[in-house]
Amino acid sequence: MPALIDLHSHSVISDGLLTPAELVAHAAAKGVRVLALTDHDDIGGLEEAKMAAAQHDIELINGVEISVTWRKRTLHILGLKINPEYMPLLNGLEQIRKGRHIRAEGMAASLDKTGIAGSLEGAYKYAKQGIISRTHFARFLVEKGIAADMRGVFKKYLVKGKPGYFEHHWADLEDAIGWIRDSGGIAVIAHPGRYDLGRTNMLLLMEEFRALGGQAIEVVTGSHTPDQYQEFAKIARQFSLQASLGSDYHGPGHAYIEMGRLPDLPHGCVPVWQDWPEIAKLHTDLH
Ligand code: AMP
Ligand code: MN
Ligand code: MN
Ligand code: MN
């Protein structure tokens, strides 16, 4: 079943490599039947994705991945089934995108200081259609031969304590959950295993997230190990949170995992999609 479902993916509107229509076609080719497009802080790709989905027999879920600062750490909160016309959500995302421009200038200034010139223009060259992100700076650094690949960039640049890092305050957790929920959507903590929070803070986050109206966490994602699938399945149960599943696909050569390859949710998880009509329809189609 889950290879048919993918609730986390990116297009050129954020830092993916495929257009929304190409992404949907790719998902279809890999056997995905229910796909959420979840670009960082921008929903500008949803309309194109929806039209492509109709042609590829894919159920498109309107999504977004919101950048949040929680206790001085950056977290990503997915909004699934959001209403893309809900003004407070649109306004909130616009504020975050404005912040991204300011951060980009800070990042470029930091790189300038270490003798790497032209990164602002260089990064924006890769970010013509939507947000500006560290990924676009990373592509510039690879283009210039300053690092061999993306992984190499994020070891030596753009992360805390390294050239190109610039401290930034994203949306508050409470606001992000509020925009998502009030628009009719479901708030999901993306890839909790990536935050390096420590046990105490992780449990605190789960508690706070739930108290603020958060509903689910990603259990199976391209950036979790199989051990982490089990770990977060247990945490989801412990906090009565539902479980989500998504590849976090960013395009060919820039992916944690290919689409349609993720395993099923571990036994005992309550899937975030349990009552979704899109899934019921899938079952009907299959039988
Ligand atoms: P930003 O939201 O601008 O801080 O950019 C974060 C994005 O950078 C993530 O969504 C990933 O796509 C990318 N990223 C972060 N760390 C790495 C890494 N180690 N390797 C490849 N891409 C990364
Ligand atoms: Mn990304
Ligand atoms: Mn993320
Ligand atoms: Mn993502």
Image (cartoon, grey):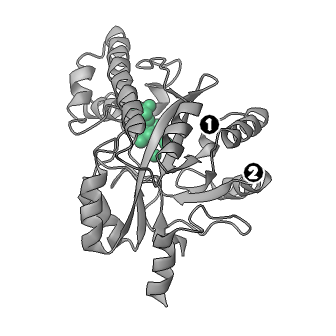
Q: Is residue 161 visible?
A: yes
Q: Which residue is mark 2?
A: 235
* Left or right of residue 115, residue 125 in this image: left
- Whichever of callouts 1 and 2 sits on the residue coming sooner in the sequence is 1
Determine the residue positioned at 22% across, 27% down.
Answer: 122
Identify which residue, 109 or 286, lies in the foreground. Answer: 286
Give above or below for 159 relative to 275: above
The image quadrant that residue 94 belongs to is top left
Identify which residue, 256 or 198, lies in the foreground. Answer: 198
Q: Amino acid at mark 1?
A: Tyr
Q: Secondary structure at mark 1?
A: loop
Q: Please give the label number shown on residue 244.
A: none
Q: Position of residue 82 (x, y in %)?
A: 44, 50
* In the image, the residue with mark 1 has its CB under 8 Å from the nearest atom of ligand 3: no
Q: Secondary structure at mark 2?
A: helix
C-alpha span from label 1 to label 2: 15 Å
Q: Which residue is mark 1?
A: 195
Which label sits in the foreground, 1 or 2?
2
Give above or below for 62 relative to 148: below
Identify which residue, 18 or 21, lies in the foreground. Answer: 21
Give above or below for 127 relative to 3: above
The image quadrant that residue 152 belongs to is top left
